[in-house]
Image (cartoon, rainbow, N blue to C red):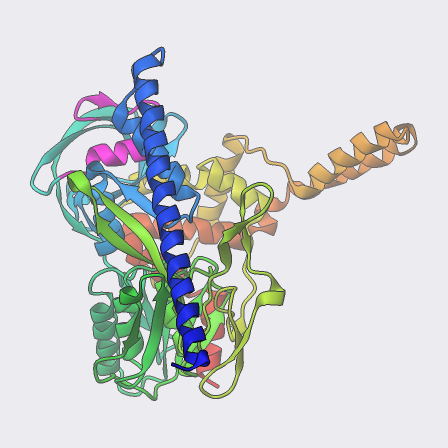
Amino acid sequence: MTKKVASTLLTLALLAVCNIKAQTDRSFEIAKNLEIFSSVYKNLNLNYVDDIDPGKTIKVAIDAMLASLDPYTNYYAESQMEDVKLQLLGEYGGIGSLIMQRGDSILISEAYQGLPADQAGLKAGDRITSVDGVSTHGKTTSDVSAAMRGQAGTTVTLGIERAGKTFETKITRREIKLPNVPYYGYVAGNIGYIKLDEFTTDAAKNVREAFVNLKKDMPNMKGIILDLRGNGGGLMNEAVDIVNIWVPKGTLVVETKGKVASKNMKSYTRMQPVDTEIPLAVVIDGNSASASEIVSGSLQDLDRAVIVGQRSYGKGLVQNILPMAYNSQMKVTVSKYYIPSGRCIQAIDYTHRDANGRATKVPDSLKTAFKTKAGRTVYDGFGIEPDVEVKPQYMSNIAIALSQKFIIFDYATNYYRTHQAIAPAEQFEVSDSLYDGLCNFIKERNLSYQTLTERMLTQLREVAENEKYDSAISQNIKELEKLLDAEKANDLQRHRTEISEMLKAELLTRYYYDRGRIVGALKDDKTIERAINELQK
């Protein structure tokens, strides 16, 4: 045996010994800390002044432990299985409604078309006073939602208050599957449009069918827009199959890499595409995450689509659902994903924390440049940056106040109760008389809100008093406040377009459900308008 071979074998032996020692030390640390935890809980149970709920306290401990890792690693008790089904499959056992909290009350904000809540006649604005005889006063939306959900075929009795009258309604729960493609149609005449809300089961099948139907109805279609705004993601395989609609079979879409080698995988398109030539635009925003970023990022890397909108969320982590004891489950982050250029778009580094324990964003200095298929430069570490940026539109102070104080919601509720119909969603606009009615309603409600300018003037007055300048400039501040009050009185007209769009969306949802809201919003959507312009170039 040569000295070189002997040296190599000795090095390998030392590494093996070090590795075994590290594993032994780690196993000891795990066993030690589990024993400490068990000892702490046993002593609490024996000595704490009040009785301890074991399920509740252990759940709190588990949640706190997982929260120290990342927001996506979660534990679900058996009672939360409907929540897991909703996340993964877009389905759950329930009545099919959205609820919201208003002070100590829980209100119906929307009843989904054709589902049990809608069939039972529940309307937006109805107050839920009880669930199966248990008062909802002071309960949270999570409490009430959990009480209304249950196995399909079982019943739930709701106490309802509407316009001062109370009644009870008994509703049979169904397996509720929310549509992941709530709408598809045409914009600008010959541009197809598909809205995808979630990457749940059959998302790719539904997007493919929508695209095929659009092509069938308009053979000379000039382009297609896939709208992923507000889409927080879902199943990775659905994302791969959606990309497959527009790219050739056998194309690498995403690769996952984690600690467990068996979970590492490369996902390729596996079917014949529908159309590899039609111009394609993908619309994203800051709430487009995970699977939405796989679709938009891979199509960008493959130079197959123009990405329009705002920078995406930046979630490049993959979770698996693991079965646990007593019918519980745990969702665990097992890997990171990498799109065709080789980049990972994870924006937050959960392995490093600041002095306050908060996870930090990946610094610009650590971002790496990658190349798309055609040689364009793209970067990792901060979501998908659009090819065509459209600045986000922020709500005005008065619009925020109208939303937070439910004024537009209440006005739409009253209007719906007294008007049987409005114009079709494609044609409906807020008329002068309708807007004037809203303005009068706002005045009756004595709306109050504070603008940034008002807050700045208040701060200026306080600083002037501290620095002894108040006597010199107090009159000037008063004059500015008076001028501001006069200008603020015009806010309803100054922000009429924005407020009208809010009212329009609320009314269209009441009369034509989610589809009506989407159709009505498309006409005034600046991001969609920009996407259309890109496709028509």
Q: Where is residue 38 in the image (x, y as percent from the top left)?
A: 31, 29
Q: Residue at x 47, y 82 (%)?
A: 372
* Picture quadrant where residue 57 is located: top left
Residue 186, percent from left and from top: 33, 74
Q: Give the range drawn in magenta.
A: 131-150
Residue at point 44%, 66% (across, down)? 284
Q: Quick check: can you spot residue 112?
A: no
- x and y, in percent, of residue 104 in the image: 38, 25
- Residue shown at 22%/68% (left/top)? 206
Judge left or right: residue 495 versus residue 341: right
Q: Quadrant of the N terminus?
A: bottom left
**Residue 398 placement: quadrant:** top right
Is 496 in front, or is 24?
A: 24
Q: Which residue lies furthest to the right in this view?
A: 472
Indicate whether 226 appears above or below 80: below
Nearer the observer, 225 or 253? 253
Instruction: Please determine whether, in this image, residue 23 is positioned above or below residue 237.
Output: above
Taking the magenta stretch, the answer to whether it contains residue 137 is yes
Q: Is residue 282 visible?
A: yes
